[in-house]
Image (tube, rainbow, N blue to C red):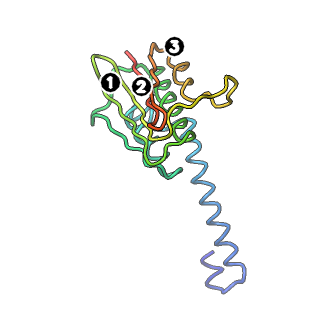
Amino acid sequence: AKELRRERSPHAAAVDVTLARIGQALATTRSISRGLEPSNLRSDGLRAALLQLATDLSQAHGIPVHFEAPARPFDGIPEAATDNLFRMCQEALGHARRNGAEHRIDLMAQETDGALEITTVDDGPGPQDHPPDDVDPGPRVPAYRGQPIGAQVTITGASGRGTDVRIRCP
């Protein structure tokens, strides 16, 4: 592209546009692949992966996701449990985004009484009455994913005041 511009080629602008589109496609591909298998989950741990998840969601959808957790990593969590906990948080945050988080989503993780507690809180309309065949399984997915690792999922909220999804893993 530089050489074409230097030669004042009429094709230089088209090459610049093509290169910009390739750059956007690469960025999108990286974002999607991080969602499928976060590269830092195994190398940096659950805390780092959750921070990246919050950052990516904020940037992609324009809803600030505030992440709060101790500075040290969560030790002693088996790899299979780490994968499930990450996916459970991904589902809870996705549900919050799809169902009306208006200005902010909070993602908090802490160790309490020997268990890891992860909570998502959104400021959306809160639980709604959905028909039984609703295509969005919403926050029920984290409960399903939590069964194999012994995690308990509690979903609370009030109409007009958002939804809280609390995940507790021993």
Q: Going from the N terminus, do you reach mark 3 or mark 1 first?
A: 1
Q: CA distance from mark 2 to mark 3?
A: 17 Å
Outermost residue toward the bottom in this view: 8
Q: Which label number is shown at residue 148?
A: 3
Q: Residue at x 63, y 74 (%)?
A: 1
Q: Which label number is shown at residue 151?
A: none
Q: Residue at x 52, y 31 (%)?
A: 127
Considering depth in this image, is 34 or 1 the residue closer to the camera? 34
Read off the residue under disc 2.
166
* Coordinates of residue 33 in the picture (x, y in percent): 58, 41
Against 2, is 33 above or below?
Answer: above
* Coordinates of residue 72 in the picture (x, y in percent): 27, 33
The secondary element bearing badge 1 is classed as loop
* Coordinates of residue 137 in the picture (x, y in percent): 61, 27
Q: Residue at x 42, y 19 (%)?
A: 78
Q: Going from the N terminus, do you reach mark 1 or mark 2 first?
A: 1
Q: CA distance from mark 1 to mark 2?
A: 20 Å
Q: Going from the N terminus, do you reach mark 2 or mark 3 first?
A: 3
Q: Quadrant of the C terminus?
A: top left
Q: Residue at x 39, y 39 (%)?
A: 106
- Frontmost of labels 2 and 3 is 2
Against 49, is 131 above or below?
Answer: above
The secondary element bearing badge 2 is classed as strand
Specify the amino acid type for callout 1.
Answer: Asp
Q: Residues within 10 Å of mark 1 (few under 14, many from 20)?
A: few
User: Which quarter of the figure has residue 123?
Assistant: top left
Read off the residue under disc 1.
75
- Frontmost of labels 3 and 1 is 3
